[in-house]
Amino acid sequence: MTRFTKIAAGVLGAIALASCGGGGGGDSVSPTQPAGIAQLVTFGDSLSDVGTYKVGSIAAVGGGQFTVNSATSKNWTELISSRLGLAAPCAAQTGFSPLIPGFTGAATVNNTACRNYAQGSARVTNPYGPNSKAVQDFVFNANGGASGGAAAVTAAANASPLGFTALPVVNQINNHLAAVGGSFSDRDLVLVLAGGNDVFLNLGGVGPAAAGGAGAGAAAFLAGWTPDQQRAVAAGGAAAVSAAQTAAVQGMTRAGEELAGYVKTLIVAKGAKFVTVVNLPDVAQTPLVAGFDTATRGFVNQLSTTFNGALQAGLANTPGVVIVDAYAQGRAQLASPAAFGLTNVTGRACSTTSTANPLAGASITCTTASTIAGDTSRYNFSDDVHLTPYGNQLLADFVLGRIVAAGVR
């Protein structure tokens, strides 16, 4: 589990989903700019985030992206932009509010000329993402708020120490529409990837269900479940576990349906002609979940496929939308790593003990100075869930190949 992420009582933590691409590495896909495409517009979570939190102490240690950071590291959206000959993406918003002694953040700043809206910890609709400011505030208020004094601050810091803005995808899209006058340009190439944090928060609601109590109820609330489901989970016992599992599956169905709806009504219906939606890889194959028992891994896989099924059904036959099956490609990649040039698909490149990383192995502050000993250049995962630079190259190759194959030239 990501070392610095704890959400309420027993909520499973992680910043965002690691995606598994495939189809070659490096710059194996030659630049092929779609006719008339002028810019990328990106919505999603940490895998697509180009620097929302690259300020304060995170920037000071050379971090800022969810990978192994360096002067040359790029995520998959930056690689696609470069290969298409487009301007380098920049973060549409920056800032975060940490509650870690000696660790500084920065006030929120909107960068109106930037078109990468993706933010680490973002969910599809729900504002309560892992390590989000929304979770931080919820726990602070639940512990008495200002009148709770130091105890309330400590509880908030334990729950969500970094306080990421984590704007949900729906907010990201609406912010873009507000910035550009209410419609997309027919020269935009829109990239969408989300859903991983919905897995983590829904799974986090299941974890404490057997014990029940206030912590279980809080986890169910943060997951986004109904009041009846929250009460059932808070009751504890076998019935609570069953109710929580049902609620989690329903939550992932809803998230997939919502994302499909936003793509259709807020992106395509608002003028976008070229839209690429990357589905959710099998989260059960990440290092975060690999150590869980077989039943839990199977349930995590179910959450991923449930989201993908709803997303696929919701976007079926939508003009201008290319759906990239990262789930199937990722499973192939992890099953035959050598075929993709990978040397390690189970370990983490970022060291959890390096003093150069103040967040104990988390990719947001991981650099080439804080990786484990040996050659990690062909590792797939940087930390528990995020990709290395090479993993990002694989994903960029795969996505760009599907865009070109769909006739966006």
Image (cartoon, helix red, strand yellow):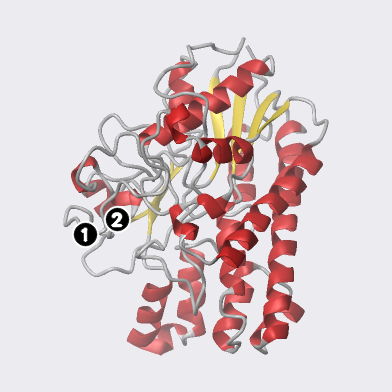
Position of residue 359 in the picture relative to residue 93 (left or right): left
Evaluate whether residue 20 shows in this view: no
Q: Whole-percent x and y of residue 333?
A: 51, 36
Residue occupying the far left of the picture: 355
At x 18%, y 44%, the residue is 369
Q: Secondary structure at mark 2?
A: loop
Badge 2 amino acid: Gly
Q: Whole-percent x and y of residue 136?
A: 45, 70
In the rendered view of the protein, which quadrant contains the C terminus?
top right
Position of residue 118 in the picture relative to residue 343 (left or right): right
Badge 1 amino acid: Thr
At x 53%, y 61%, the residue is 129
The residue that disc 2 covers is 361
How far apart marks 1 and 2 lie (CA) works out to 7 Å
At x 43%, y 20%, the residue is 82
Q: Whole-percent x and y of residue 377?
A: 30, 34
For label 1, count other residues whose C-alpha is less than 10 Å away and answer few (under 14), some (14-19) or many (20+).
some
Residue occupying the far right of the picture: 317
At x 40%, y 80%, the residue is 155
* Residue 134 numbered tag: none
Q: Whole-percent x and y of residue 150?
A: 33, 85
Q: Are marks 1 and 2 in contact (CB under 8 Å)?
A: yes
* Residue 353 numbered tag: 1
N-term-proximal mark, 1 vs 2:
1
Evaluate whether residue 174 shows in this view: yes
Q: Secondary structure at mark 1?
A: loop
In the rendered view of the protein, which quadrant contains the N terminus?
bottom left
Position of residue 143 in the picture relative to residue 102 (left or right): right
Q: Quadrant of residue 230?
A: bottom right
